[in-house]
Image: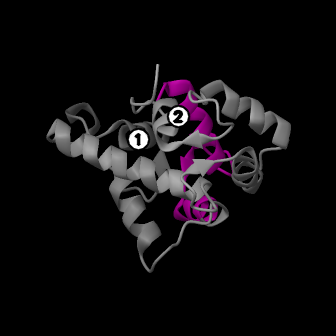
Amino acid sequence: MPMAELEQVFRRYDANGDGKISAEELASVLRALGAPLGPGEVRRMMDEMDSDRDGFVDLSEFAAFHCGPTPAHGGKGGDAKDQEAASEAELREAFRMYDADSNGKISARELHRVLRQLGDKCSVADCSRMIRSVDADGDGCVNFDEFKKMMGGGGGRR
């Protein structure tokens, strides 16, 4: 994901604009997305992202988490196949949050619902335009391959 997009996502999480994401801010966004939050889930996610252990996730930690662990970001690098599998699993989880009816496709209405929950003021028509920009098969929805391509994970049709 390009850094500009990461910064935009980061700002959505950083509700108070202080340049860092707290556990409360993370939980708020996840709840708005309808993510099931089990006991300790937010803490586990914070622990995974908060490499300097200050209790917050700053932009560099957020970027390192979303771009995969690298030696430059305090990670071990890991096996490329393991990282790819983990990334695919994260993308599938994100896709499921958008795909409210679990039909394997994200419609404009489903996209609109999630974006509204995140505070975006877009219309369903705006969401339809967004979908058209990545809808490789022309069905008016975003399937997982299109979602993966849109999120920078490759795949999809060219």
The residue lying at 83 percent from left, 43 percent from top is: 124
- In magenta, the rendered stretch is 1-30
Query: Answer yes or no: do the residues labelled 2 and 1 have beta carbons within 8 Å?
Result: yes
Give the residue at x 51% y 73%: 37
Residue 78 image point, x, y percent: 15, 41
Identify the secondary structure beneath mark 1: helix
Q: Amino acid at mark 1?
A: His
Q: Quadrant of residue 123?
A: top right
Please say if 4 is above or below 10.
above
- The answer to whether 154 appears left or right of 17 in the picture is left
Mark 2 → mark 1, Cα distance in angstroms: 8 Å
| Residue at numbered disc 1 | 66
- How far across and down, in percent of the image, does residue 43 sit? 42, 68
155 or 65: which is nearer to us?
155
- The residue depicted at 76 percent of the width and 30 percent of the height is 129
Q: Return the x and y of residue 79 as percentages of the image width and height.
A: 14, 40
Q: Amino acid at mark 2?
A: Leu
Image disc number at residue 141 = none
Residue 85 vs residue 56, the one in the foreground: 85
Report the residue at 37% width, 36% height from top: 67
Residue 94 part of the magenta segment: no
Any part of residue 122 in sight = no
Q: Position of residue 47 (x, y in %)?
A: 35, 61
Choose between 26 and 19: the one closer to the eye.
Answer: 26
Q: Which mark is residue 6?
A: 2
Judge whether residue 28 is colored magenta.
yes
The disc, 2 or 1, on the residue closer to the chain's N-terminal end is 2
Q: Secondary structure at mark 2?
A: helix
